[in-house]
Image (tube, rainbow, N blue to C red):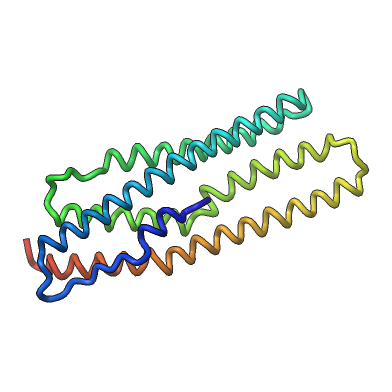
Amino acid sequence: MNWNDVKATWAGQQLIPAPLADLKTLRQDFEAKQRRLARSLLWRDGREAAAGLLVAGTFAYIGWQMGNAGWPIALAVALMLGVTVFFIRERVRTRRERVGADAPFAVKLEAEIAELRRQRGLLLSVGTWYLAPCMGAAAIVAVTALIHAPIPLSAKLLAGVIMLLTLALTCWGVWALNRWAVQRNIDPRLRELEDLRRYLLPPGST
């Protein structure tokens, strides 16, 4: 999963309020960055949904070419379609929870914090909702193809070992990159926004 667009939006966005900061300028800067984050998430969700459909279609074609022997690949297709549905649901959720342009600044700030927390949770749980179905689908297709491939058993076993190692390294790499993104980009950004909220809306304010 490629989160570079989202990470690029978070990275380098300094929003630490100064005592004499001009509120109008601060608000304009915040809203500009909020729009960039929204565009990044839109592009990410659309790209991942399209990729899921493409992969599902490719798997379906492979299974169709194999005939009856390729029936397990239907499970792989279902898994990839599930990933696609997840990203479509994210788009629907984002649109439903979108804050209007005329909303108070405090409401927009709360919405941005909530969205970042949502993305943080997704990155930290990427192994459950993204890696598991994607890697599971790839494994189903690879194993089904290997079982019915006209090659010696020793070659099948070697290919299987290589496949497992590749999947394991891929999973670890994606998992590590996403945790790095949380620690390097999301957590600092959340702290900045929460500091801004405390600065603008101290306890007891209305």
Please tell me how many numbered marks the rendered image carries. 0
In front of the other: 72 or 27 = 27
> Residue at the spot x=33%, y=40% of the render?
93
Give percent across and percent down for residue 1: 53, 50
> Residue at the spot x=57%, y=37% of the render?
80
Q: Quadrant of the C terminus?
A: bottom left
> Residue at the spot x=37%, y=43% of the render?
42
In front of the other: 102 or 135 = 102
Outermost residue, left direction? 206
Q: Quadrant of residue 162?
A: bottom right
**Horizontal placement of 122 versus 69: left or right?**
left
Give percent across and percent down for residue 194: 24, 66
Outermost residue, bottom direction? 19
Q: Quadrant of residue 189?
A: bottom left
Relative to 27, does residue 150 appear above or below in the rendering? above
Give percent across and percent down for residue 49: 48, 38
**Horizontal placement of 133 versus 19: left or right?**
right
**Horizontal placement of 5 versus 71: left or right?**
left
Relative to 149, does residue 38 appear above or below in the rendering? below
Give percent across and percent down for residue 127: 54, 54
In front of the other: 129 or 170 = 170
